[in-house]
Amino acid sequence: MVIVLAVSCVPASAAHFKDMSAAHWAYASIEWAAEQGIVGGYEDGTFQPSRMVSEAEFLVMYMHYFFNINSVPTGDMQGEHWASSYYATAVDLHIPVQGGVYKDRAIRRGAVARTITKALGYDYNEKQAVEWLLKKEIVAGRISGSATYASYAPDESLTRAEAAQLFKTLHRKGYTRFITH
């Protein structure tokens, strides 16, 4: 299944993705995230940096980054969602995800902010989470020079390139919490 490969934790390199060049704004972040096993490519050898990240894909990236969970089995029962075991783990860890019909929908940037701050020990509402991430310069607004809740565009979807950039920035700033399961 293509989506399973999209979140594969097999180490890769941005240089190996046929749709990536060193000129892409997030090339270094994608390279880093691929080497860490946080992101992977698609079966056709592409990364698709502008593609929107589904909630399920983001959850898998999140689990790989924050909890070093690289071997959670995928759904294997007929009719079971490919990321169902990640969702079961998310429930156990109190990770704020919606699940259900939202698993395969593009994740909102505001939901990403809330999920990230939860991993860092903060139980913020969405606006507080975005403002905290902006204050710590972990994220930026989509409008150059503007770091506000509105400029962050919390209702817009997160791209794969933005996800790689987010995890690399978290790592660079020391916001890690690796727990081996």
Image (tube, rainbow, N blue to C red):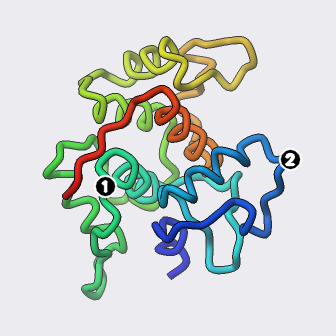
Mark 1–mark 2 distance (CA, rounded to whole Å): 36 Å
In the image, residue 105 sits, relative to residue 130, either above or below, namely: below
| Residue receiving disc 2 | 23
In front: 141, or 99? 141
Q: Left or right of 121: which side holds 110?
A: right
In this view, which residue lies farthest toward the left? 92
Name the quarter where the C terminus is drawn: bottom left
- Identify the element where label 1 is drawn: loop
Residue type marked 1:
Gly
In the image, residue 94 sits, relative to residue 153, either above or below, namely: below
In the image, residue 46 sits, relative to residue 133, either above or below, namely: below
Q: Residue at x 51, y 72 (%)?
A: 3
Q: Residue at x 62, y 79 (%)?
A: 43
Measured from the top left, where is residue 15 in percent x and y? 75, 62
Measured from the top left, where is residue 148 in percent x and y? 57, 12
* Residue 180 image-quadrant placement: bottom left
Q: Residue at x 80, y 47 (%)?
A: 24
Residue type marked 2:
Ala
| Residue receiving disc 1 | 99
Q: Are marks 1 and 2 in contact (CB under 8 Å)?
A: no
- Identify the element where label 2 is drawn: loop
Measured from the top left, where is residue 143 in percent x and y? 72, 20
* Residue 121 image-quadrant placement: top left
> Residue 159: which numbered mark, if any?
none
Q: Left or right of 21: which side holds 158?
A: left
In front: 75, or 40? 40
Q: Residue at x 53, y 67 (%)?
A: 11
In the image, residue 45 sits, relative to residue 156, either above or below, namely: below
Q: Nearer the viewer, mark 1 or mark 2?
A: 2
Measured from the top left, where is residue 99 in percent x and y? 31, 55
In the rendered structure, which disc, 1 or 2, sits on the residue that comes first in sequence? Answer: 2
Judge the density around disc 2: few (<14), some (14-19), many (≥20) Cα neighbours within 10 Å.
few
